[in-house]
Image (cartoon, helix red, strand yellow):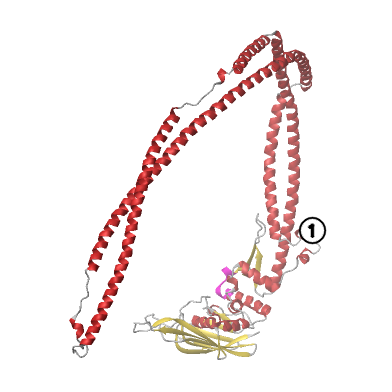
Amino acid sequence: MRIEFKAITIKNFKGVLGERTINFNPTLTQIMGANHAGKTTIVDAVRWVLFDKNSEGMQVFGIDPKDENGQVIHHLDNTVVLELTADGKDYKLEKVRTETWTKPRKQEEAVMKGHTTKFFVNEDKYTAKDYAAFIDSLCKEELFKMLTMPSYFPNLPAESQRKLLIKMVGNTSDEDIAGDNEDFKALLTTLAGTDIQKYREQLRYKISELKKEIEQIPSRINENTEELKKLEKDKPNFELTRKRVKEIEKGIENIDNELTDLSRTVDADFNERTKERTEINKLKQRMQDIIQSYQDKNTAEERKHKKAIDDAKYELEVTDRSIRNAKAAVEDAEAQLNKIAIASEDFKSRWNKLDQTTFAWDDNQEVCPTCHQRLPQEDIDRMKAEMDGNFNDNKSKQFDAMYEEAARIKKRKADAEATIKTAKDNQVKLDQQRTEQEEALKKAQETQPNLVYHTDDEEYQQLQMDVNTRTATLEARTAEETNDTRVQQEANLKQRKAEQNRLRDELRDELAKEQRITDKQNRIKELEDRQKNLNQQLTDLEKQDYTAEQFTIAKITDLQTKVNKHFTNVQFQMFEPFITTEGIKTTCECTMHGTPYRDLSTSEKINAGIDIINAACRFNDIYAPLLIDNAESITDILPTRSQKILLIVSRDKELTIIQ
C-alpha cells in the first residue's frame, strides 16, 4: 500500500487563525519558515486529524488559537481536512472540534462546558469509534509513526527495537543454529523446549551453590584432621585395655553369683515378713470398716435431726406468710368499705337531687317561632301534657337505675364486711397455731442427735490390741535382720561390684577412642571424596553453561546477521561485545559506520532513520509520507520510495511551500 498526502486545510488550529490550505507534491514538498512560523503546527494537524494526538504523542495540547495577549479566542471551530490517496483511492478526512456553551440558571452569561468533535470521511459523518477503525484499516498508529518519523524507531527502548526487528527477519530455528554441532544438539535435547535463559539461570544457581560447598570442605577437613591428631596422641594400648575389661567383667560375674546365693536366704525371711504384714493389714482394714459403719450411723442421725429443725422452720414461715396475708386482706377490705361509704354519700346526694326535680314550663314555648303569634290554647295544653309525661318517664327511669346502683353498693359493703370477719377469725387461729409451731421448733433445736462412737465397740477394741501386738513383734524381727551379718555381706558385695563397674566403664571410655579415631578417619576420607565429586560436578555444569552461552552467541550472531542484511547504511548490535560474569547481555543498538546512533550528527540521524523506514516499508509493504523535521541540516537525503515532506528552518517569517 502507498499512502500520499495531497493537501491539508487547517482552520483556527493552534497558530493558524482563519483558514490555510497546503498542497503536497507526490514526491517532495519543502515547507520553509523561521522558528514558530507554523511548521510544527502542520505536523500536529496531520497527527491530530489521524490519531487525535500532536507530534509528541499527547492528546491534550493547545489546539485553540490565542490573541496577542495569549488568551484563547472562543466561539471558533477547530478544523483540519486531510486529503490523501491510499493505493490510488482518494480519501478526504475531516475533523471538526466545537465548543459547547450553556447558560446556568440565574446567570446572565453563558459558560463553556467543554468540546464536541465531529468526524467525516469523504464528507460522510462517522462516530469516533468508526472513524478510529477506518484510520486503523489504513495504517495502525504505531506503524504510522515508525514509517513517517525518522527519529521514532531509534529512540524506542532496546527491547522494543529487538521485538520489531525479530518480527521483520523472523527467528532461525534452534535446530538450524545447532547444525552439526554435537554439543549444541545435546543442549537442545536437555532443554526440551525450556527457555535457555531460565536454563542458564538454573545452571548458574547450581554452580554458585557448588562453589559455596566446595569452599567449605577444606576447613572441615582441617578441623577433623586436628581432632584426629589429638585423639591419636592420647590413645591407649587398645589390646591390653580390652583384655583388662574382660577380666573385670569376669570378676563382676562372680560377685553376682555370690549375691544370688545370699539373696535366697534373705528372700525366705522376707516372704514370711510379707505374709505377716498382709495379715496385719487385713485387721487394719476390718478396723476401718467398723469406723466407717459408725460414721454412717452418725451421719444419718445428724441428717434426721437437721431435717426436723428445717421442717419446723418451714411450717413457721408458712404460718407467718398466712398471717401477713390475713392482715393484708383486712386492710384491703377496710379500704374498700371507706370507698363504699363515700360512694353511698354521693348516691344519697344524687337521689335527693333527683327526687326534688319537678316539671317546669317555659312561657316562650307558647309563641310561634315563625309568626310570633300566641299558639292556640289546645296546642299549648297538648304540648304541656306531652312534655310533662316525658319528664316523668325519664325521672322514673333514673330512679330505676339508682335502685340497681343502691343494690350493688349494699352487696359490695356486705362482701367487704364478710371478708373482714373471715380474715380476723382466721388470724386468731393462725396466731394460736404459730405459738404451737414456735414451741415445736424450740424443742427440735434443743434435742441433740443420738451419736455412737467406734471406740466403744468391743470388736474394734480387740482388733486394736491384736494389731499393736503383731506390729511390735514384726518390727522387732525386721530390726534384728537389719543388724544381721547377711545384710553386711550383701552391702560389701554390692560395694565391690560398684567399684568394678566404675573401673570397667572407665576402660570402655578409653576403648571408645578407637571408634572415634576410625570415625574421624572415615569422615576425612568422605570429605575428600565429596570434594572430588563436587569438583567434577562443577566442571560438568560449567561446561554445560559454556555450551549454552556459545549457543546463545551463535543464535544472536545469526539474528544480527539477518537483521543487518535489511539495511544499507545502519547496522544493529544485538548483544554487548564483552561477556560479563552474568553471561551474555542482549541489547539493540543502532550504529552507522561504527558510530552509535546517539553520537551521530543530525543529518546522519535523519539518514539512519530513513534507512530503517525503508526496511520497515519493504517488510510491511506500506509506504507513507516521510515527515522530516530539521531537514535544513541535511544536504544528501537517502533515496526512498515514500513521499517526502521536509520541514526546513529558514529566514522566512511566513511559511513558504516549495513543491
Q: Which range of residues does the magenta coloring cover?
A: 597-605
Nearer to us in this view, 76 or 216: 76
Quarter of the image for the N terminus: give it.
bottom right
Q: Which residue is rendered at x = 51% and y = 29% of the image?
A: 302
In the rendered picture of this protein, how many numbered marks are placed on residues? 1
The reply, left or right, for residue 221 in relation to residue 363 is right
Please rate how many residues cluster around mark 1, counting C-alpha atoms within 10 Å: few if below 14, some from 14 to 19, many from 20: few
The answer to whether residue 446 of the structure is visible from this angle is: yes
Indicate whether residue 495 is drawn in magenta: no
Counting from the top left corner in percent of width and height, residue 85 is at 61, 88
Quarter of the image for the C terminus: give it.
bottom right
Q: Which residue is rendered at x = 27% and y = 62% of the image?
A: 347
Q: Quadrant of residue 138?
A: bottom right
- Disc 1 marks a residue whose amino acid type is Ala
The reply, left or right, for residue 136 in relation to residue 196 is left
The reply, left or right, for residue 62 in relation to residue 554 is left
Q: Quadrant of residue 285?
A: top right
Considering the numbered disc 1 on the image, is that residue within a helix, a strand or a loop? helix
Counting from the top left corner in percent of width and height, residue 164 is at 65, 72
Q: Which residue is rendered at x = 59% and y = 25% of the image?
A: 293
Nearer to us in this view, 5 or 408: 408
Counting from the top left corner in percent of width and height, residue 100 is at 44, 84
The reply, left or right, for residue 375 in relation to residue 627 is left
Q: Main secondary structure of the magenta part?
A: helix
Nearer to us in this view, 611 or 584: 584
Indicate whether residue 601 is drawn in magenta: yes
Counting from the top left corner in percent of width and height, residue 613 is at 63, 77
The residue beneath circle 1 is 186
Q: Quadrant of residue 506?
A: top right
The answer to whether residue 571 of the structure is visible from this angle is: no
Q: Which residue is rendered at x = 43% and y = 87% of the image?
A: 76
